[in-house]
Image: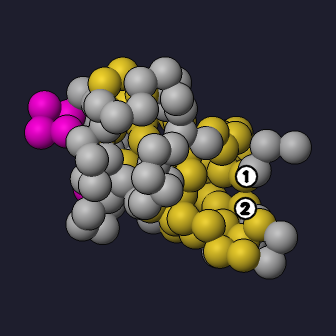
């Protein structure tokens, strides 16, 4: 799924590699530090976030690439059960309502999705 990239602050994958309702985990480098992120396809619209709960600072996924609640409608933090809207990253319930996941930028470049840090 992942495409090779010379710039470690950018992640790429083919548009067709991420089906609706699916997620993919990746790592970006920012200011020399590795930061884990993930992308989700919500009905053909792509959203990417830093893999860190705003409440506890822990990764959302307990198991690799397990970000969705059992019903597949929401993102969930495995540490404290915080529930996040997959399209906005806003916490809807749990210990940190109203806070949000750190957003990453998703662009398309021909047949690829490109994830990068906001400027």
Where residue 77 appears, as percent x and y from the top left, is: 31, 47
Q: Which residue: 80% across, 78% down?
A: 32
The answer to whether mark 1 and mark 2 are in CB contact below 8 A is yes
Magenta region: 66-72
Where residue 46 appears, as percent x and y from the top left, is: 52, 34
Label 2 sits on residue:
10
Look at the image and tell me in which quarter the C terminus lies. top right
Q: Which residue: 41% across, 60% down?
A: 59
The residue at the far right in this view is: 119
Q: Is residue 82 visible?
A: yes
Label 1 sits on residue:
116
Look at the image and tell me in which quarter the N terminus lies. bottom left
Taking 19 as reference, is 117 above or below it? below
Question: Is label 2 in a helix, a strand or a loop?
Answer: strand
- Report crowding for label 1: few under 14, some 14 to 19, many 20 or more residues within 10 A (C-alpha): many
Task: Tell whether position 73 is magenta.
Answer: no
Where residue 55 appears, as percent x and y from the top left, is: 45, 44
| Alpha-carbon span between mark 1 and mark 2 | 5 Å
């Amino acid at each position: 799924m992942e495409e090779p990239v010379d710039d470690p602050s950018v992640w790429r994958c083919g548009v067709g590699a991420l089906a609706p309702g699916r997620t993919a985990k990746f790592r970006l480098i920012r200011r020399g530090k590795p930061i884990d992120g993930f992308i989700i396809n919500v009905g053909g619209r792509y959203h990417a976030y830093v893999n860190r709960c705003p409440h506890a600072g822990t990764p959302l996924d307990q198991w690799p690439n397990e970000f969705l609640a059992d019903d597949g409608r929401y993102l969930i933090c495995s540490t404290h059960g915080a529930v996040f809207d997959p399209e906005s990253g806003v916490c809807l319930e749990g210990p940190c309502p109203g806070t949000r996941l750190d957003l990453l930028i998703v662009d398309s470049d021909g047949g690829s999705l490109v994830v990068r840090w906001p400027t």
